[in-house]
Amino acid sequence: QVQLVESGGGVVQAGGSLRLSCAASGNGFFINNMSWYRQAPGQQRDLVAAITRESRTNYADSVKGRFTISRDNAKNTVYLQMNSLKPEDTAIYYCNAEVHTFTDAEYNGWGQGTQVTVSS
């Protein structure tokens, strides 16, 4: 089973920046699309940004121009650079990966989540 481990969350003042990382580890797999979701208290989990293996990207309207998703296929790692952070960006951020194993199994993997708190 592939494990996804996020890092980089924390507390930052409004207008500040954070960079999240999510690394996949395991044996016998490759990853197709990767994405970041977030979930605020009492809210549903929403897509923030996604990136294909060829690095085509898409973003939620609320983060366009402020967040940048990128990936390193050799390291099986996806990043989320978050600039000009706002209090409404406060949430738990989750990494998601479409995993394909060399035995032709496919599944969606999730990280454990990392807390991002933006103070006003």
Image (cartoon, rainbow, N blue to C red):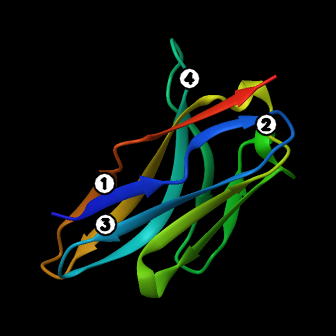
Disc 3 residue type (three-letter): Val
Quick one: quadrant of the N terminus? bottom left
Query: Would residue 1 appear left or right of 14 to someone viewing this image?
Result: left
Front position in the image: 13 or 6 = 13
Q: Earlier in the sequence, mark 1 or mark 3?
A: 3
User: Residue 79's x, y, as percent?
Assistant: 58, 64
Residue at image point 63% right, 76% down: 55
> Can you give x and y, in whole percent of width and height, for residue 6 in the image?
43, 54
> Which residue was labeled with disc 3?
99
Q: Is residue 57 above or below residue 55?
A: above
Q: Earlier in the sequence, mark 4 or mark 3?
A: 4
Residue 4 placement (x, y as % from top left): 33, 59
Q: Quadrant of the C terminus?
A: top right
Upstream in the sequence, badge 1 or badge 4?
Answer: 4
User: Quick one: SS at disc 1?
Assistant: strand
Give residue 44's position: percent from left, percent from top: 50, 22
Q: Secondary structure at mark 4?
A: loop
Report which residue position mark 1 lands on: 109
Amino acid type at mark 1? Gly
Distance from label 2 to label 3 (Cα)? Answer: 27 Å
Q: Of the residues under marks 1 and 2, which one precedes in the sequence?
A: 2
Q: Earlier in the sequence, mark 2 or mark 4?
A: 4
- Reading the image, the residue beneath label 4 is 40
Distance between mark 4 and mark 3 Cα atoms = 26 Å
Check disc 2 and give the amino acid type.
Ser
Q: Which residue is mark 2?
A: 62
3 shown above or below 10: below
User: Which residue shows up at 17% across the image and 79% down it?
Assistant: 27
Q: In front of the other: label 2 or label 4?
A: 4
Q: Kindly indicate whether the residue at mark 3 contacts the one at mark 1 (C-beta within 8 angstroms).
A: yes
SS at circle 2: helix
Q: Are marks 4 and 3 in contact (CB under 8 Å)?
A: no
